[in-house]
Image (cartoon, helix red, strand yellow):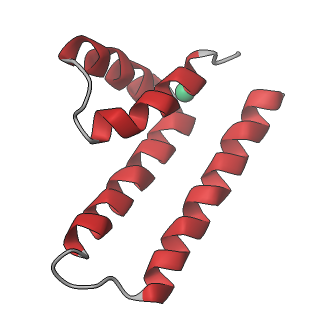
Amino acid sequence: MSCDNCETALENLYLFLDEEIDHASIDEIQAHIDSCSSCLTAYDLERVVKALVSRSCAEKAPEPLRERVLYSIRTVQVQITENRGI
Ligand SMILES: [Zn+2]
């Protein structure tokens, strides 16, 4: 089953998390994320990173943790790309 909406959903994911898009688009993305495990994984990771980043404004996030999170994101992105390619 192909998932053409993934690209759009992931592109909008950043805007979604920053709440920079209108509510109709949010509903669309949310619906896709709910039905797509690849996007759900990416979405969860993004939320973790965002929480880390906002917290690190007050207290600096430890560098190893930050690197681990960035590594996790890259791994998920590779998995999503591979899934899409099949
Ligand atoms: Zn998807």
In the rendered picture of this protein, how many numbered marks are placed on residues?
0
**Residue displayed at 31% across by 58% down:** 50
Residue 27, quarter of picture: top left
65 shown above or below 1: below
Residue 33, quarter of picture: top left
Residue furthest to the top: 24
Instruction: Locate residue 37 relative to residue 1 in the image: left or right.
Output: left
Instruction: Locate residue 75 relative to residue 31 in the image: left or right.
Output: right
**Residue displayed at 70% across by 46% down:** 79
Q: Position of residue 57 (x, y in %)?
A: 21, 74
73 shown above or below 84: below
Instruction: Locate residue 33 relative to residue 56 in the image: left or right.
Output: right
Residue 70, quarter of picture: bottom right
Specify the quadrant that holds the C terminus.
Answer: top right
Quadrant assignment for ligand 1: top right
Instruction: Locate residue 2 relative to residue 45 in the image: left or right.
Output: right
Q: Position of residue 44 (x, y in %)?
A: 39, 49
Residue furthest to the right: 86
